[in-house]
Amino acid sequence: MGNITSIADYQKSFAAMLAGAEANADELAGTEEVRGGLTAAALDVQVALNRQNSLKGQAQQATRDLEDALDRGKQMYSRLRSGVYMHFGQQAEKLAEFGLHPRRPPAKVKPVLPEIAKPFQPGPNPVETAVSETDGTTQEVKAA
């Protein structure tokens, strides 16, 4: 079959093979079942292509219908949202029931006061002393 890569090329090859087989049916005795199988497969390919093209058209139409419905929905949503704002106002808490955010006054921020330095309070004072061994380590001694 050579370098056939497209479905159309396969269809042409199938048709040419079937035409040649039909023209030479006397010489190809015993191949009737195989020829019948190729004829059925070629027909199934055409049916599947037709169905695929039909569904592709349906999918494209469904996409257009979806886009149209979304555009209408966006317009109606915008109009209804404006009506809700006009009816209840922009600060009404009732807006939350419509999935809208009411405008609220900004939260009052407490002023940050600088910290006043705390008076010094002495705490425990650990004293480091050498350990009786001469290894140079130190230990913490607690004052009584």
Image (cartoon, grey):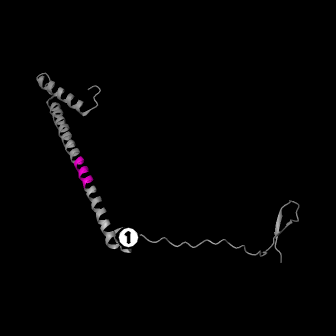
Q: Position of residue 39 (x, y in %)?
A: 16, 33
Q: Amino acid at mark 1?
A: Gln
Q: Does 114 sit above or below residue 47? A: below
Query: How many numbered marks does the figure carry?
Result: 1
Q: Position of residue 53 (x, y in %)?
A: 21, 42
Examine the structure image and report whether residue 64 is included in the region drawn in magenta: yes
Q: Residue at x 38, y 74 (%)?
A: 93
Classify mark 1: helix, strand or loop: loop
Q: Nearer the viewer, residue 13 or 110?
A: 110
Q: Nearer the viewer, residue 58 or 25?
A: 58
Tell me which corner region of the image, top left, top right, bottom left or bottom right, holds residue 23. top left
Q: Does 32 sit above or below residue 91? A: above
Q: Nearer the viewer, residue 78 or 45?
A: 78
Q: Position of residue 54 (x, y in %)?
A: 19, 44
Q: Residue at x 86, y 60 (%)?
A: 136
- The span shown in magenta is 59-68
Q: Residue at x 17, y 29 (%)?
A: 15
- Image check: 23 left or right of 90? left
Query: The C terminus is located in which quarter?
Result: bottom right
Q: Position of residue 85 (x, y in %)?
A: 34, 69
Query: The N terminus is located in which quarter?
Result: top left
- Image check: 136 left or right of 88? right
Q: Nearer the viewer, residue 9 or 85?
A: 85
Residue annotated with mark 1: 90
